[in-house]
Amino acid sequence: MYAQMVDTGVARVRSADELEGEEAGFQRGIDALEKVEATDWMPEAYRKTMIRQISQHAHSEIVGMLPEGNWITRAPSLKRKVTLLAKVQDEAGHGLYLYCAAETLDVSRDTLLEALHSGAAKYSSIFNYPTLTWADIGVIGWLVDGAAIINQIPLCRCSYGPYARAMVRICKEESFHQRQGFDIMLTLCQGSPAQKAMAQDALNRWWWPTVMMFGPPDAESVHSAQSMAWRIKLQSNDALRQKFIDQTVPQAALLGLTIPDPALTLDPETGHYRIGPVDWAEFYRVIKGDGPCNRERLAARVAAWEDGAWVREAAAAHAEKQAARRKECAA
Ligand code: FAQ
């Protein structure tokens, strides 16, 4: 379950001297920071890698709607409800741009969704954790969207044009999401002792899963070397993780919250925060389908797909009718 590991046919990263013909030209274009467009020639392994990453990203956006969607009816005020509703709707929009970007690579949306619903495709590990209190909604915006922005800003400059362009708008929207999360946390932390305790509890549960969101350590990251050579990834998993930690620790201090890591220290030489050991066994368990909510999330996605069948049928019937009318008018 959830094992995607698409075989791209790339056994190792080949140097520029080892490449020939179209492949050498392709790599020269990448090295010259040219964008790859859908109609350009590309190595099959590049196409497969892009489909894998963009579709995993799209699946993450729509599965990511579930933990937050859960709280729309329970948001503590009308303002919070409207804001959360808009945020969850934005995530659906991100899914849409990303599925469209993936479709430019000659794969149908139905195929991608089938892979998600059968459990063959991955989505971000972070969305397999439960949202137990309102503070979890604050933490998702603050930490999860915060991490997503750090990961996605370099993607705005990645080599595949349709993905890079989709990321520009997504990043702008994510920055609102991050601020709404921080605003919820600020309100809770300035509230009653019970509210502050709720905020701390949410941070305790979400900190390590968010640290893991950036993917395995560089030494264990199977795709990084080739994806960096193709400028799909501009920074490594560990470099982005470090950026997130350095940015977030002072924000927690401002909120008056404690990062749940007794080993956390500021390295005076480098100016970077050092964290304690990450439980990578937990990460691998979650991405293999055995996290706290994997089964629940997948069941909710499949049910949403099945419940929406009539909408897809109605849209297809409408499109057919419109096309027939246009044909009649043209005749
Ligand atoms: N979860 O060799 P690497 C969001 C897998 S959007 C699950 O390092 P790569 C917005 C990886 O797929 C969040 N699986 O892989 C939002 C590979 O398995 P495979 C999603 C993970 O691709 C906020 C294996 O481990 N963002 O949050 C994870 O070079 C709030 C080996 O790993 C993106 O998708 C993980 N965390 O680097 C929505 C960004 N990490 O495929 C709602 C685009 C790794 O061979 C509410 N993606 N794996 O079976 C990327 O930047 C990259 O794909 C990485 C992974 C960095 C995630």
Image: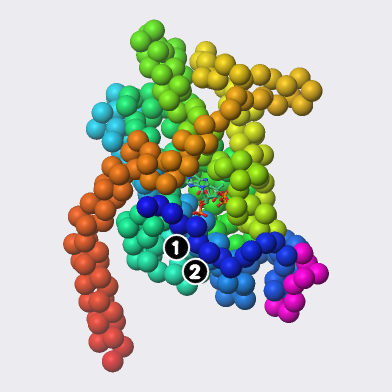
Q: Is residue 63 left or right of residue 13?
A: left
Query: How many numbered dots are placed on residues in this image?
Result: 2
Q: Residues within 10 Å of mark 1 (few under 14, many from 20)?
A: many
Residue under label 1, please give it. Answer: 100
- Residue 65, horizontal then vertical, whole percent: 35, 43
Residue at 20%, 55% in the rendered image? 307
The residue furthest top is 193
Q: Amino acid at mark 1?
A: Cys
At 25% across and 82% down in the image, what residue appears? 324
Q: Is residue 19 magenta?
A: yes
Is there CB contact under 8 Å for labels 2 and 1?
yes
User: Which x, y percent locates residue 214?
Assistant: 56, 41
Say whether residue 269 is left or right of residue 143: right
234 in magenta: no
Q: Residue tagged by mark 2?
A: 104
Using the rendered view, name the quadrant where residue 88 is placed.
top left
Span shown in magenta: 15-22
